[in-house]
Image: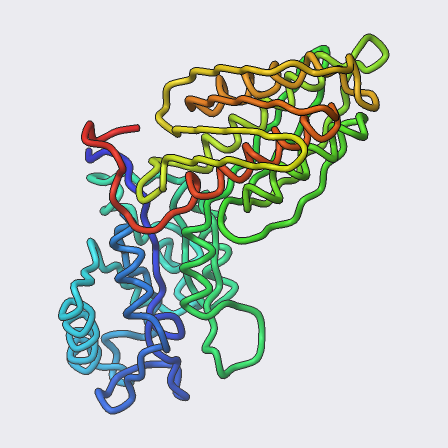
């Protein structure tokens, strides 16, 4: 069996081509491709997805729906996609009506039984794309994500094909960390300005994490309940480890990222930051704070936070800070690391920025 691959199980009518008024495409002059579908599938193919068409065709082969009519249109659809470099690894068609009670008709997964004997799919990164409730149920039966497509001109639930691409390629991750000291949920979204919601029980630390995400250009939702009745150490350290792990997961294979980030942030306080998302953790820090604490955050935990972040993210992080106002110095550190992360996280293609072939 082949190695598991990200796979999109795609419905045909209403998803790839417009749903005809009589519920079946059986003539070439009825075929209308959904807006944006060719560009969308080309981008998804380049991103590493393979495609399997899975479609119910009620009464296929009967007098009311001759197989020859279907195959003529099906051949045209497949050739149209193939002419744009878009091929389907398999085409699975159920010819039965709902009243037939077969095991292969969606939302049942029997239609894929033969294909699955020689193929495996990466469920965590696969999805069903369709326009009906049965497609959503089919996804649940396969144990994969479901995305509903709709024509941009039609009302109702669903996404256009460009929106489907954005949803599939968005780099997100959620990490839950539970120990005797802390209970943390950290969610990141690297593409676009996502929500920023932070609650750690340490007000100044919340403010710094917000600066890190805001200047890093990524969404962050982080909730932490820690043993603050003992001290702040576990909360700060475990938040760094959870955030670093979430960022590492969201980066995936790191294809197309900027990898490096540099910044010289200057004000009354000056922070210099260099970062490399190399997969190898290394941290250096130079600077000293004039106060032992800002708000409820001990300043000794600031370099410890970034060391833990570096360890969990797997990056080289060099941080130097100087100044007079400790509050400003710490804020410069978090803003500076965020600004250095912004170009490093940004994805601008699909090539891996490494001659080794892996990061």
Q: Nearer the viewer, residue 240 or 159?
A: 240
Rendering coords of residue 355 (x, y %): 19, 31
Residue displayed at 69% across by 19% down: 236
Task: Tell whether 113 sits left or right of 127.
Answer: left
Quadrant that contains the N terminus: top left
- The answer to which image quadrant residue 309 occupies is top right
Task: Tell whether 42 sits left or right of 110.
Answer: left
- The answer to which image quadrant residue 60 occupies is bottom left
The chosen color scheme is rainbow
Residue displayed at 39% across by 40% down: 123
Residue displayed at 39% across by 80% down: 19
Q: Residue furthest right?
A: 229
Task: Tell whether 264 sits left or right of 205.
Answer: left
Residue displayed at 60% across by 50% down: 194
Q: Is residue 159 above or below residue 327?
A: below
Quadrant that contains the C terminus: top left
Rendering coords of residue 39 (x, y %): 30, 68
Q: Residue furthest bottom?
A: 29
Count the marks.
0
Q: Is residue 65 above or below residue 190?
A: below
Rendering coords of residue 269 (x, y %): 65, 30
Q: Residue furthest top?
A: 230
Q: Nearer the viewer, residue 226 or 112?
A: 226
Rendering coords of residue 79 (x, y %): 14, 72
Q: Nearer the viewer, residue 222 or 212?
A: 212
Q: Is residue 97 above or below residue 32?
A: above
């Amino acid at each position: 069996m082949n190695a598991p691959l990200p796979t999109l199980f795609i419905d045909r009518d209403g998803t790839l081509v417009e749903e005809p008024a009589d519920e079946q495409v059986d003539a070439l002059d009825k075929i209308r491709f959904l807006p944006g579908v060719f560009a969308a599938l080309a981008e998804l193919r380049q991103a590493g997805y393979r495609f399997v068409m899975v479609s119910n065709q009620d009464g296929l082969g009967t007098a009311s729906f001759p197989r020859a009519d279907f195959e003529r249109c099906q051949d045209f659809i497949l050739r149209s996609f193939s002419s744009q470099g878009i091929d389907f690894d398999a085409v699975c068609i159920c010819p039965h009506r709902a009243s037939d009670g077969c095991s292969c008709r969606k939302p049942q997964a029997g239609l894929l039984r033969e294909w699955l004997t020689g193929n495996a799919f990466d469920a965590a990164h696969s999805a069903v794309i369709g326009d009906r409730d049965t497609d959503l149920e089919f996804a649940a039966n396969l144990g994969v994500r479901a995305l509903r497509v709709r024509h941009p001109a039609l009302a109702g639930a669903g996404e256009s094909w460009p929106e489907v691409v954005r949803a599939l390629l968005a780099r997100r991750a959620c990490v839950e960390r539970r120990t005797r000291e802390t209970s943390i949920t950290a969610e990141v979204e690297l593409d676009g300005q996502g929500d920023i919601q932070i609650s750690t029980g340490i007000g100044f630390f919340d403010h710094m994490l917000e600066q890190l995400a805001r200047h890093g250009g990524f969404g962050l939702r982080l909730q932490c309940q820690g043993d603050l009745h003992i001290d702040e150490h576990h909360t700060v350290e475990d938040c760094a480890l959870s955030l670093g792990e979430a960022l590492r997961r969201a980066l995936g294979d790191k294809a197309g990222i900027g990898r490096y980030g540099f910044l010289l942030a200057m004000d009354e306080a000056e922070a210099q930051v260099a970062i490399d998302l190399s997969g190898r953790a290394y941290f250096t820090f130079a600077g000293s704070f004039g106060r032992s604490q800002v708000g409820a955050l001990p300043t000794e935990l600031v370099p410890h936070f970034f060391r833990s972040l570096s360890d969990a993210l797997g990056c080289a992080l060099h941080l130097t800070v100087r100044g007079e106002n400790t509050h400003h110095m710490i804020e410069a550190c978090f803003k500076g690391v965020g600004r250095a992360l912004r170009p490093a996280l940004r994805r601008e293609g699909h090539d891996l920025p490494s001659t080794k072939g892996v990061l």
